[in-house]
Image (cartoon, rainbow, N blue to C red):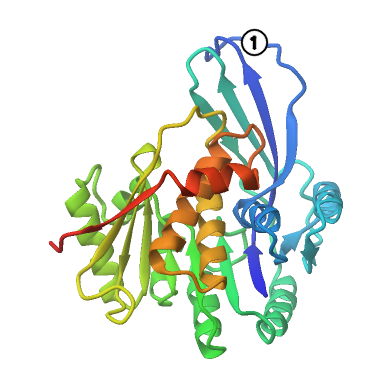
Amino acid sequence: MIVTITLNPAIDIAYKVNHFRIGHGHRVERGRKTAGGKGLNVSRVLKRLGDSPVCTGFLGGINGKWIMDQLEHEGLDQTFIEIKDETRDENMSCLFRDEENGNQTELMEKGPFVSAEEQEEFEETLKQLMSEASLIIASGSLVSGIPVSYYREISEWAHAARIPILLDTSGEALEKGIEGKPFLIKPNKAELCKYMNQANLSIDELIAAAKNICAQGVRYVLLSLGKDGAILVGDDPILVGDDQILRAEIPAVPVVNAVGSGDSMVAGMAYGLQKKYSLEDCLKWACACGIANAMEWETGTIQPHAVQELLEKIQIKQEAKL
C-alpha cells in the first residue's frame, strides 16, 4: 500500500485568460476546481494508473469538507485529520494561463494553523498506516504550527519501520528533510539551485550537487528538467553502479497545463518502484506521467493511454561519470 502525505492541501482553481495584463481587470470563463496539494495530485495519478493509495494529512473547514467530498467521488481512500482552523479563505491556489503566449501565473495562499494536539493525532494515524505501508510519499509545503524539520522526523519514522519514503518539497523543508535520509527526493532545477544557494547551475553542476546529496544518505535524486527531461542520480552500487547517472530524453508535446507535472513524475516513479520495475523503466514511467499531465488542463491528471504511448518515445541513456 502506498501512503501519500499532504500536510497542506488546497483547492486548485485554474482560469484561462486571453491577453493577461497586470493592473487590468479580466473577465474569465468559470474556473476549473480540483482537490489539490502535491500529495493529492500524486494520489490522483496513482489511482489513474490502477493503484489504490491512501491519503493523509490535515483538512479543515468548508474547503476541507469540499476536498474530502471530491476525494470520495474520485474513489480515493483517505484518513485526514480534521483540524479546527477554518480554511475557507486560507487554502486556495489559483492558476492563470494566458492563452495567447502560454505563460502561467500561480497565486498560492499560506494555509491553516495546526495545533500540537492535531499534530499528535496525525502522528498516531501515520504510524498506524506505516504498519501496512510499502511506500510513503511526502509532498508539498508545511502548514503553520508544524516544525520546519517535520519531514526529517517523518523520514526517520519511515526508516524505523523499514519503509522507503519519497520526498518532494522545497526550501528549508527540503534542506531539513534531506537530513532524514529519505529514499528519494525530487527537486526541479530551480529548487536544487536554491538548495545550493546558486542562481543557476549547469547540468554537470546539478549532477554534482545531486551526488553530494546522495553522499549524505539519500538513495536517489530524481531531478526534473521540464522539456529537457530528467536525470536520476543514485547511490546504490547493486542497482545503479558506482557513479552512474541515468538521463531521460523526452519527446516534445503541446503543453496545456504543466502544473502538477512534478507530482505526476513522483507518482510514476512510485508506481514503477511498487511494481519492482528496473530503474530505467521507473524513470520512463516518471517522465511519461509528468508529460501526460502537462497535456491535460486539470491539475494532477493523466490519461493512461497517453502514458503508454509516451513510454515508447522516451529514451534512457547512461551518463558518463563526472
Name the image quarter holding residue 29: top right
Q: Is residue 102 left or right of residue 144?
A: left
Name the image quarter holding residue 244: bottom left
Q: Secondary structure at mark 1?
A: loop
Residue occupying the point 53% across, 28% down: 105
Q: Is residue 2 left or right of residue 68?
A: left
Which one is in front, 161 or 173?
A: 161
Q: Is residue 129 left or right of residue 286?
A: right
Q: In this rendering, is residue 131 above or below 208?
A: below
Which one is in front, 229 or 304?
A: 304
Q: Quadrant of the C terminus?
A: bottom left
Binning the other alpha carbons within 10 Å of mark 1 as few (below 14), some (14 to 19) or many (20 upward) gives few
Q: Is residue 232 left or right of residue 18?
A: left
Q: Position of residue 119 (x, y in %)?
A: 69, 73
Residue occupying the point 85% across, 56% down: 72
Residue occupying the point 37% across, 69% down: 220
Identify residue for label 1: 25
**Observer able to see residue 300:** no
Q: In this rendering, is residue 241 above or below 67?
A: below
Q: Position of residue 17 (x, y in %)?
A: 62, 16
Which one is in front, 227 or 127?
A: 227
Residue occupying the point 60% across, 53% down: 38
Q: Position of residue 111 (x, y in %)?
A: 66, 50
Amino acid type at image mark 1? Gly
Q: Position of residue 88 (x, y in %)?
A: 79, 44
Q: In this rendering, is residue 291 above or below 224?
A: above
Q: Residue furthest left?
A: 322
Q: Quadrant of the N terminus?
A: bottom right
Name the image quarter holding residue 3: bottom right
